Image (cartoon, grey):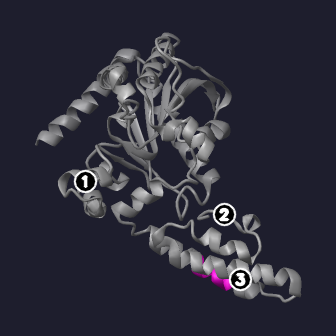
Amino acid sequence: MANQDDSQVGPKGEISDIMSSYLDFEKPIAEIEGKIHELRHLSDGSGVNILEEVSRLQGRVDKVLRQTYSRLSPWQKSLVARHQLRPHFSDYISALIEDFTPLAGDRNYSEDRAIVGGLGRFRGRSLMIIGHEKGADTEGRLRHNFGMANPEGYRKAVRLMRMAERFSLPVVTLVDTPGAYPGIGAEERGQAEAIARSIETCLDLRTPIITTIIGEGGSGGAIALAVANKILMLEHATYSVISPEGCAAILWRDSAHAQDAADALKMTAQDLLQMKIVDEIIEEPVGGAHRSPEAAIAALGDALEASLGELSSLNGNELRAKRREKFLEMGKAGLG
C-alpha cells in the first residue's frame, strides 16, 4: 500500500498487489518503490550487495514524492484525504490521549458508532474529545458506518459538549466524514434538526472548542462538530459543502466531472485558509499523513497544544462571543 515500508512487503508475488493500492497519480512512485522491493528481495538470497542502487532509487522516490505532493490538484487532494491508511480518530486517541474514557449514547434513542467521544487527558490537560470514526478495515467501516453519523450521534455530541461545559473542560473535535448519513431512518429521527442543535450548541458553549479537519470534511455532517474558536486543518484534508462527485452529479448530471467540481468547490486547506474559513494548516509528512502516521499525529498534537494555550486566558463569555463573531464574519465576507 501507499505507505507500507519494506518490512511489510513480502516476496515478489506480492508486489503487484501492493502497487495496485497506490493512488492513480502515485504510479510513478509505485514503480520505483516496486524496484526497490525487488532488489531487496533479490539481495536476501543471493548475497549481492545492492545497497548503492537501493540508495539511488530511494533518492528518486523522495524527489518524486516531494514534486508530486507539492502540486496536487484539488481532486488529487480529495483522494489523499480519503486514503484508507490515513490516521483515523482512534489512532489519534491512542497516540495523544491518556486515560481515555469513552461515553456512549444520546440518552434518547441509541448509541451511534460513527461519532466517538469521551473524557481524557492531553499533555496534562483534562478535556472532552469528540470525532468521526470511519474504521480501519471492512469490519470497522461497517461498524462505524464509514463515519456517516445518524441523528443520535450528533445528539450524543451535544450531550458531551454540555457535560464539558459543566466541568469547565475544553472540547476538541476531529472531523473526518463524507457527510451525515442520508438514510430514511435517519431522516425520520430528525437528522437535520440534530445537526442544527449541534451547531447551536457549539455556538452557545462557554468553554474552548478546537476543531481539526483530519480527512474529509463533508457538508453539515462535518460543520456540526466544527463551529469552533480555532479551526485547524491537515495539509491534504478537504472541507466542503458537498463532495466533488455529488456536485458534478447535480451541476453536470455526470460524476465524470468530479475533477472540475473539486476545482470549483475551493475545498483545499490552502483555499480555505485564504478565505479565512480555517485558522491554521498543519503540515503533513511528505507523501501525506498515510505515509508517516506517527509524524502526522505528533504535528496535530503540537498544534492542539498551542491552540489550547492561546484560548486558556479567555473566560466563557469571551470564548462564546469571539466564536459567534468569527462565524458572523465568515457570512459577511461571503455576502461581500
Q: Is residue 117 above or below residue 71?
A: above
The residue singled out by tag 1 in the image is: 249
Q: Is residue 268 above or below residue 185?
A: below
Front position in the image: 42 or 329: 42
The residue singled out by tag 3 in the image is: 54
Q: CA distance from mark 2 to mark 3?
A: 16 Å
Give the crowd class for mark 3: few <14, some 14-19, many >=20 residues within 10 Å: some
Front position in the image: 50 or 127: 50
The N terminus lies in which quarter of the figure?
A: bottom right
Q: Residue flagged by tag 1: what amino acid is it? A: Ala
Indicate the secondary structure of the residue bearing disc 3. Answer: helix
The region drawn magenta spans: 54-61
Q: Of the residues under marks 1 and 3, which one precedes in the sequence?
A: 3
Q: Which mark is residue 4?
A: 2
The mark closer to the camera, 1 or 3, is 1
The mark closer to the camera, 2 or 1, is 1
Q: CA distance from mark 2 to mark 1?
A: 34 Å
At horizontal 44% and vertical 56% (from top left) the residue drawn is: 236
Give the crowd class for mark 2: few <14, some 14-19, many >=20 residues within 10 Å: few
Name the chief secondary structure element in magenta: helix
The C terminus lies in which quarter of the figure?
A: top left
